[in-house]
Amino acid sequence: MTQLVWFRNDLRVADNPALTAACKSDDEVRACFIITPEQWQEHSWSPARVQFVTAHANALSEELARLGIKLSFIHADRFEDSIGKLESHCSEHGVKALHFNEEYGVNERKRDKAIKHRFDDIGITVRKYRDQTVAPVGEILTQQSEPYSVFTPFSRRWRSWIEETHPGLLPAPKARGGAVSPARIDTVPKAFRDAPDPLVSTGEKAAHDQLERFVEEYGGAYKEKRDFPAIDGTSQLSPYLANGILSGRQCLIAAKQAQAMGGNEEGLATWINEIAWRDFYINILYHYPRVSMHRAFKPETEALAWNTPGDTFEAWKTGNTGVPIVDAAMRQLNQTGWMHNRLRMITAMYLTKNLFIDWRLGEDYFMSRLVDGFLASNNGGWQWSASTGTDAAPYFRVFNPVTQSERFDSNGEFIREWVPELAKLDNKRIHDPGAKSGVIPKGYPRQIVDLKESRKEAIARFQALKN
Ligand code: FAD
């Protein structure tokens, strides 16, 4: 008889609850990963993400093969098709129990429910594990056993849970007999072949090296440096976290160990708070599934009269809005598959408050480009910026992208890197080349909307919701 581990958003051998549980038995352990290109397209997975996931699925296959666990790649276009394919795979290999770590998107939950239903019928045990967050999802609740919808009290409870519980890490399983030959995905599905060069190295070991380097060398300065896109102030671990090559627990514990060694205390405390944001948004997705069904967290904001997306949306997507920091950020996204957090907020606010274009379009565009596209955080970030979400930016506090640029890219270093048309402008003019009737360098557009007027209009439209 066989125990089967189904890898999905958890492409690692260390600290993996489903894998650890399957390996407790003396039975043969096998693994599988299901390739679902149509579903990935429907969920707007980017080519960068698909290539990243494919490379890591291959790396995982090799690592498991060394441990004596054979990973099979199963092809099914959509989630619905995975059920039958998984069933055939189980009967072919005499599987008596299926193990997987939970996912919280609405389609993923529907798929898992259908599988449980079907497997109950055919006598295969289904075991699920809560893996995605530091504190098991659903565990951090108010005194009235309600989910939190505001971050600060959530994070307070989250930190006390950690102090009370001392979460630990699960080691990678020991080798089970001799090595087996690894299966490989040789080509990525056609729709995902055109991707930027990889942002980070492949493999669990590379992820841990990057984590270690960050907490030891950069963590101390995180608080001071994290908002400046021209410098390496953040960890860039998001592709690993979003695709489960690293767990949040591994990040938390590495940061805590580095804190215990002294030196990086405050910077790392700020960084740990970002891991809490990640958990917060996963909990929102879990408790309020409507956010993964294109619905606003604040239902009253569904009545907002968004502008019809046209040329301005295209200008935003391609980095041609005439606002240098927005354009630099969008070009970074398009060319690398990643964007700095400060810039995600600036570009999202500009799209939703100055262009007044529906946050759902921005959310989808980000997803279609990001290597770290992660439903819970992307949705949370977009709804925060659009003031439609939980604990969101108040609608009247609209970032001025030019002021943000002067503050967080004061020497225009980041803009110069991504908008070469502006490279020769001085440090003052580079943030707003058209200001005070300045001459705009050839090839660069004038601002497509007036920042002050559009801000006023956005506030008025939000205020109108109250009438
Ligand atoms: P670090 O600053 O080093 O933070 C460490 C980790 O904490 C990150 O890797 C991430 O897992 C988590 N984290 C940090 N900030 C946040 C946050 N605000 N919300 C949730 N988790 C956070 N993050 C994604 O992983 N995937 C997304 O698709 C995504 N889309 C976003 C869209 C918008 C509009 C906004 C405003 C934010 C979005 N974020 C998303 C959150 C954040 O921008 C990225 O996690 C961060 O920029 C990744 O860079 P890093 O790994 O260097 O982060």
Image (cartoon, rainbow, N blue to C red):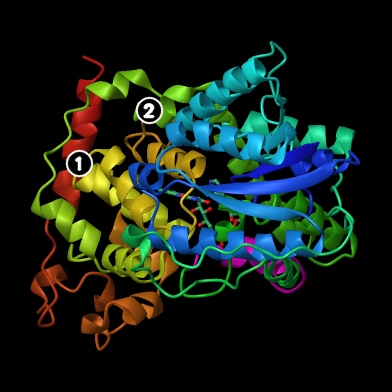
Q: Position of residue 376 (x, y in %)?
A: 50, 39
Structural crowding at the residue carrying mark 2, measured as other residues with C-alpha within 10 Å and reported as few (<14), some (14–19) or many (≥20):
few
Query: Which label sits on residue 293?
Result: 2
At 77% from the left and 38% from the top, the residue drawn is: 3
Label 1 is placed on what type of residue?
Phe
At 65% from the left and 56% from the top, the residue drawn is: 245
Numbered disc in front, either 1 or 2: 2
Q: Position of residue 160 (x, y in %)?
A: 80, 33
On the question of residue 401 being in view, the answer is yes
Q: Quadrant of the C terminus?
A: top left
Q: Quadrant of the N terminus?
A: top right
Label 2 is placed on what type of residue?
Met
Asked which secondary structure carries label 2, the reply is: helix
Residue that badge 1 annotates: 356
Magenta range: 214-228
Query: Does label 1 or label 2 sit earlier along the sequence?
Result: 2
Instruction: Say above or below: 409 vs 386.
Output: below
Q: Position of residue 42 (x, y in %)?
A: 34, 42
Q: Position of residue 214 (x, y in %)?
A: 70, 69
Along the horizontal axis of the image, is 129 left or right of 230? right
